[in-house]
Image (spheres, helix red, strand yellow):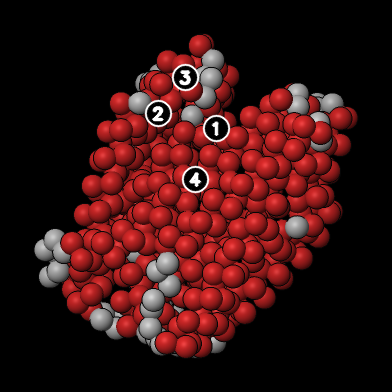
């Protein structure tokens, strides 16, 4: 079933394999950030500042709801990647179709629940009255079309399970270009407001999902030939990995929401400084998360092939890649954080600027904890231990909530800057211990426990 576009990660030196596989993921993440910036600019420029705020206020709910569905869809691909590594075509087909059924069912269920609770959720996060209706209109369309996003993430995950990280990147670029074009058409020409922005997003995601599906079925007739019957055994195995992975995404958003509430109590200077610093930090750490995604696929294939020696070698290679990148990222921020903060804050006060610089100085020094966490967490997920990986998300929540409460108690912005690193450290310690134990048991018993 292998084609020239596919790359089997069970052969060859791990470091260059992981690095090559990661590059399209990194580029895709960075391009997504560029698109988000353009999308935000169009809404703010051609509708209103209130419209921009209404769309922005939905971000935490978006992450909470979509984290569950999209994280689960990506997780459903892990057993499939193991089947690819094992060379078991029948299992690959069965996991593909039953993972697809699960993705659709979960999307419908979560959409129905979220739509029923939409206004109460918006009120629960204290959405200002003047933004409430626009925020509800925007999020309602996004939720109705969330199946498109879920299917894109599932099909893209399947392509990566086959070793193809390039095609999802190409389709993401096409989708983002279409989205910006539709934004301009629906907002400027047809004056559809925030509904137009939502329709543009859903439409472009549907196109990217169709492109991924076309690539999958076009390259592998075996997927469309058999294995379509419902198998509760395969659904159970896929759900055991995917659902905890989705819950991990959602759970970590809760910690971020609580932390944001703590930051808000420290005043507008702290809020502006943290938002500025966090936007820069997010872009800086995206490559680390992309390497983590590569580690999940690499581990899944080698775990399926029973090549635990390569899994261990992959961990070492992943840590080398992350450490090297962390040094580069720290140097880049050391040199560029001043100009970057100035661009984002514009005419911000000296206090806001200084606090943002402090935030970046502290967090960039501790980047290695985040990079290492991405390696160990995704290795655990790649081996199929979704519940264990989910617990690392709870550790992150504990770190963020603890730092947030301490920051309020001591009125300390430094503790806000330390919140994410503390979350990473707590989760990393757990993941390192869990990975060591699982690999040790694998070596001792030679089978999954």
Where residue 262 appears, as percent x and y from the top left, is: 68, 31
Instruction: Please name the residue that numbered disc 2 is placed on.
Output: 139
Q: Residue at x 32, y 28 (%)?
A: 115
How much space separates mark 4 and mark 1, taking CA atoms?
26 Å
How much space separates mark 2 and mark 1, taking CA atoms?
15 Å
User: What SS does tag 1 mark?
Assistant: helix
Res. 149 in view:
yes
Instruction: Please name the residue that numbered disc 1 is placed on.
Output: 40
Residue at the far top: name it.
Answer: 130
Instruction: Please name the residue that numbered disc 4 is placed on.
Output: 251
How much space separates mark 2 and mark 4, taking CA atoms?
20 Å
Between disc 3 and disc 1, the foreground one is 3
Left or right, 353 with reference to 298? right
Residue 123 got which mark?
A: 3
Residue 436 got which mark?
A: none
Position of 307 relative to 142 (above/below): below
Q: Residue at x 23, y 66 (%)?
A: 234
Position of 174 relative to 269 (above/below): below
Residue nearer the viewer, 131 or 369: 369
């Amino acid at each position: 079933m292998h084609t020239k576009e596919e790359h089997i990660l069970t052969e060859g030196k791990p470091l260059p394999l992981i690095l090559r596989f990661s590059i399209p993921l990194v580029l895709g993440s960075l391009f997504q950030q560029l698109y988000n910036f353009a999308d935000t600019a169009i809404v703010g420029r051609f509708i209103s500042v209130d419209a921009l705020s209404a769309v922005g206020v939905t971000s935490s709910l978006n992450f909470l709801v979509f984290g569950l569905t999209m994280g689960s869809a990506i997780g459903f691909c892990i057993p499939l990647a193991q089947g690819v590594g094992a060379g078991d075509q029948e299992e690959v087909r069965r996991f593909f179709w039953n993972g697809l059924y699960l993705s659709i069912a979960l999307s419908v269920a979560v959409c129905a629940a979220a739509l029923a609770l939409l206004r109460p959720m918006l009120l629960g996060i204290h959405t200002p009255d003047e933004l409430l209706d626009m925020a509800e209109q925007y999020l309602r369309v996004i939720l109705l079309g969330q199946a498109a996003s879920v299917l894109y993430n599932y099909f893209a995950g399947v392509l990566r399970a086959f070793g193809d990280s390039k095609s999802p990147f190409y389709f993401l670029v096409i989708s983002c270009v279409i989205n910006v074009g539709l934004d301009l058409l629906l907002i400027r020409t047809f004056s559809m407001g925030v509904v137009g922005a939502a329709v543009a997003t859903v439409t472009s995601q549907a196109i990217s999902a169709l492109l991924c599906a076309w690539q999958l079925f076009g390259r592998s007739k075996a997927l469309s030939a058999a294995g379509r019957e419902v198998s509760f055994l395969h659904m159970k195995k896929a759900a055991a990995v995917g659902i905890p992975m989705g819950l991990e995404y959602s759970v970590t958003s809760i910690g971020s929401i609580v932390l944001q509430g703590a930051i808000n109590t420290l005043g507008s200077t702290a809020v502006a400084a943290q938002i500025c610093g966090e936007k820069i930090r997010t872009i800086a750490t995206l490559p680390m998360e992309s390497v983590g995604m590569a580690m999940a696929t690499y581990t899944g294939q080698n775990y399926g092939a029973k090549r635990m020696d390569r899994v261990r070698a992959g961990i070492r290679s992943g840590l080398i890649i992350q450490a090297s990148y962390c040094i580069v990222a720290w140097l880049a921020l050391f040199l560029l954080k001043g100009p970057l903060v100035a661009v984002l804050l514009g005419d911000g006060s000296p206090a806001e600027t200084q606090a943002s610089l402090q935030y970046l100085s502290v967090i960039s020094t501790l980047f290695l904890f985040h990079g290492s966490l991405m390696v160990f967490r995704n290795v655990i997920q790649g081996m199929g231990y979704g519940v264990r990986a989910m617990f690392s998300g709870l550790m992150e929540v504990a770190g963020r909530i603890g730092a947030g409460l301490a920051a309020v108690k001591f009125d300390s912005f430094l503790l806000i800057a330390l919140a994410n690193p503390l979350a990473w450290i707590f989760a990393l310690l757990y993941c390192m211990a869990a990975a060591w134990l699982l690999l040790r048991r694998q070596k001792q018993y030679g089978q999954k426990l």
